[in-house]
Amino acid sequence: MDKSFPIFEKYSYIPVIAGPTASGKSALALEICRIADGELVCADSMQIYKGLDIGTAKDSKEEIGGIPHYLTDIVEPGTDFSVYDYVSTAIPVIRDILQRGKLPVVCGGTGQYISSLLYGLDYGNGDEDAETKATKELEEEFVKNGIDGLYKRLEEVDPEAAGSIHPNNTRRVIRALAVYKALGITFSEKNKKSKIKGPEYPFKVFMIDWNREELYDRINRRVGVMIDNGLIEEAKMLLDSGVDRTSTCWQAIGYKEMLKYLEGEETLEQAADRIRIGTRHYAKRQLTWFRNMGGDVTCISPDTPENNALKVLEQCMPIR
């Protein structure tokens, strides 16, 4: 673990603001950046895609206010971007921020991204040629027979992975099965065996701990705002661009639900209801992920971004 940068004389940890969607992560992370002369590193698997702004809840220019942002808008919709790709991209960015004497502030709700930073997971191990071949075979099976049989197989061979992967997330279902097919070990087992490097830098994870009713109310209100602000137009853009519907970007909640509305199979209110339900289910899975990290996640009570930013920074300072 590298603590050689001058910023670690002031802070013992790099703060990571994690948690479920609509919990106020971005507002808190941005406030930390303002107070501590920080720069924000995104840890969201959907905000990496260019042009998908409303549905992925990217910060607006007004909210950003000149604070440097990294790892948003870095790949085109339809492009695969793995956890290994994320870590390989994020670590050099964090190193550059540290070298310039700034405080990196990681923010996002993608549990795999955050776990990979925190535990130093190395997803580069394994027989890549065998995994590529297995992936192609499974993709052909998906095109022919759909996802149901593949997901049932995943539940049988790797129930732990199936519990953390939504059936609609075709890419991740196929990825988990490809690991098992190519290597003879489960995706979950491979990940556990990968926890050998340790973190590159000292990270400390924080999560705003809303009660479920308040969080769901925030989600419901956010969906309405997204629709008002252009979610329909973004989904139409994605549809018109011809991006493969099995691509990861189509799994972002909001876009796939809008398909039936755009194709005339549902009313807008029906689509909106499915977005609200899907987002609440997604938030539940996010909470499960971060709570399973146990004492590695520090929960903080809901408060103003200003007050919570001071609490986070205080807990990141060296003990005198």
Image (cartoon, rainbow, N blue to C red):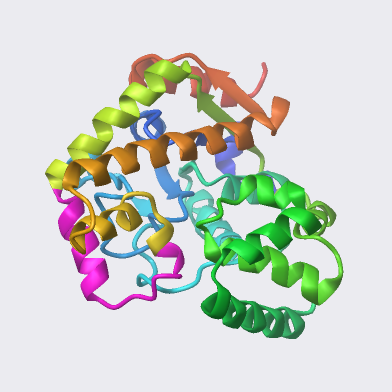
Q: Position of residue 255 (x, y in %)?
A: 31, 56
Residue at the image position 52 percent from the left and 58 percent from the top: 169
**Does residue 78 sit above or below 101 in this rendering?**
below
Q: How many dots with numbers?
A: 0
Residue at the image position 51 percent from the left and 68 percent from the top: 81
Please provide the residue range marked out in magenta: 230-249
**Residue in front for this viewpoint, 214 or 107:** 214
Secondary structure character of the magenta stretch overall? helix
**Residue in front for this viewpoint, 288 or 91:** 288
Residue at the image position 38 percent from the left and 66 percent from the top: 74
Residue 149 occupies quadrant: bottom right
Q: Position of residue 203 (x, y in %)?
A: 63, 39
**Residue in front for this viewpoint, 91 or 12:** 91
Q: Position of residue 134 (x, y in %)?
A: 71, 80
Would residue 86 be found to the left or right of residue 149 on screen? Answer: left
Would residue 320 be found to the left or right of residue 166 on screen? Answer: right
Q: Is residue 170 magenta?
A: no
Would residue 185 be found to the left or right of residue 61 on screen? Answer: right
Residue 7 makes an appearance in the image: yes
Q: Is residue 239 magenta?
A: yes
**Residue in front for this viewpoint, 121 or 102:** 121
Residue 37 makes an appearance in the image: no
Residue 250 occupies quadrant: bottom left
Q: Position of residue 120 (x, y in %)?
A: 72, 52
**Does residue 260 sit above or below 141 in this rendering?**
above
Would residue 99 be found to the left or right of residue 178 on screen? Answer: left
Residue at the image position 26 percent from the left and 63 percent from the top: 51
Q: Quadrant of the C terminus?
A: top right
